[in-house]
Image: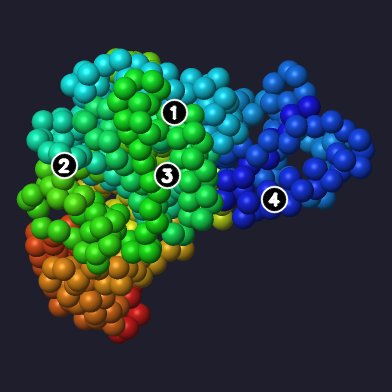
Amino acid sequence: MKIYVPMDSAAKALGADEVAAAIAAEAASRGLDIDLIRNGTRGMIWLEPLVEIDRGAGREGYGPVTAADVPALLDGTLDSLGPVENIPFFARQTRLTFARCGVTDPLSLSDYEANGGLAGLRRAAAMSGAEIVEEVTRSGLRGRGGAGFPTGIKWNTVLQAQADQKYIVCNADEGDSGTFADRMIMEGDPFCLIEGMAIAGLAVGATKGYVYLRSEYPDAIRVMQEAVRIARANGILGAGILASGRSFDMEIRTGAGAYVCGEETSLLNSLEGKRGVVRAKPPLPALEGFRGRPTVVNNVISLATVPVILEKGADHYADFGLGRSRGTIPVQIAGNVKYGGLFETAFGMPLGELVLDIAGGTASGRPVKAVQVGGPLGAYMPCGKFETPFGYEEFDGAGGLIGHAGIVVFDDSADMLQMARFAMEFCAVESCGKCTPCRIGAVRGVETIDRIAAGDPAAVPLLTDLCETMTDGSLCALGGFTPYPVMSALTHFPDDFATAKEAAE
């Protein structure tokens, strides 16, 4: 009998380690022969700790399980959720990038290969760099870190650049509120990211890679470091990967926790041991990146998606999606919702379906008021925008952005003026200080919103002008996108701003 208990951070925070210890102790006291496997999470966080038991006829789910439930679990009297794959939240997904997450032992290379792992790298090892880049370009893969820039174009720029050394840098500084997809992959399927980075190295001629991982993710750091060691010991990294005669190796580096280091040039400065401040562009990192050399900087999910593209082919991946948004997107559902977690789906699902159907509406039972999509710099989408399909151009046309695809739901008790103030305060705290519109503008923004709250009507047009200045003048997205939540709150929820004024009067 195989028993799976997640070792994912979210599951551990909800008691998974205690449940695993209780299962081991109870099985030993009963003389039961079990195989206890610590897997990644399936992403259904409201069911964690989600324990799965395979008695030979497939994996049956139980959750959320407590240590006190373990005797009933082993007796077979605990209520079952049925086959895990049939749980509606899971069954409706299109799992490509996250196909193995929650299925395998994250640090078992044999599990990884048995579930399709390394097929993409083996195919890439027999291709030229230009052929790999062409495959990724045809797939339509775009950056999943926020900007949505076509991955193939970035790779081709680095491929064509002339240099004695090139680098692959993985941006694992997942700092957006309500996002956890990067962490889920690194903790639940680390070899997938390693394989994607190796393929990227073969594609552009880079022999060295770095994962820049936030210090707030100690479990991900531990798993990734061990996975790199295992990969190197088995010829997947190092000299002559998979006996191909081509080399690629990588290291895990830990950042100190600055939000702005999620911006690629600030990340590169930090990786070089410098202060994490934004660089002016040009030059682009693809031409002068890490240590002044051509560098591919991609998000975790972008790189972890590359193996499935090489394994199944560009056309298979591009067959999913909407418009210029091809493939799948891991939507991270958080905030005031009944069913929070990760939902991987093809681009195109309407926002309202994700919030009201997949997420089940609010946990409080009150009406949904707003949904912030894209982290702390994302716009607040009102219910009137719920028909907007999940796609880069579609969200842009609706005045929003997808970002890292985190959605945070608020019910009708939320004060949108205070949410706008939080956005400005967040920018003021997290600004690297390099440019004036961000450094000073965010501080003035907090003051201006406080004036509106105090009943000063003249502050409203001033806030609008300030947001235009930040959008047009900031060096990076931190200052440039902060106006999204501020102006969307002001535009779509004017009553919250008027109420503040009337209360002051």
The foreground one among 455 and 103 is 103
Establish if 164 lies above or below 110.
below
Three-letter amino acid code at the position of disc 3 = Asp
Q: Position of residue 271 (x, y in %)?
A: 29, 56
Q: CA distance from mark 1 to mark 4?
A: 32 Å
Of the two numbered discs 2 and 1 in the rendering, the one whose residue sits closer to the viewer? 1
Three-letter amino acid code at the position of disc 1 = Gly
On the question of residue 319 being in view, the answer is: no
Q: Which mark is residue 235?
A: 1
Residue in the picture at 85% in, 36% down: 74
Quadrant including the N terminus: top right
Q: Position of residue 52 (x, y in %)?
A: 70, 33
What residue would you read off at disc 3?
Answer: 182
Q: CB of mark 2 within 8 Å of CB of mark 4?
A: no
Q: Secondary structure at mark 1?
A: loop
Residue in the picture at 9% in, 62% down: 473
Establish if 291 lies above or below 308.
below
On the question of residue 131 being in view, the answer is: yes
Of the two numbered discs 3 and 1 in the rendering, the one whose residue sits closer to the viewer? 1
Of the two numbered discs 1 and 4 in the rendering, the one whose residue sits closer to the viewer? 1
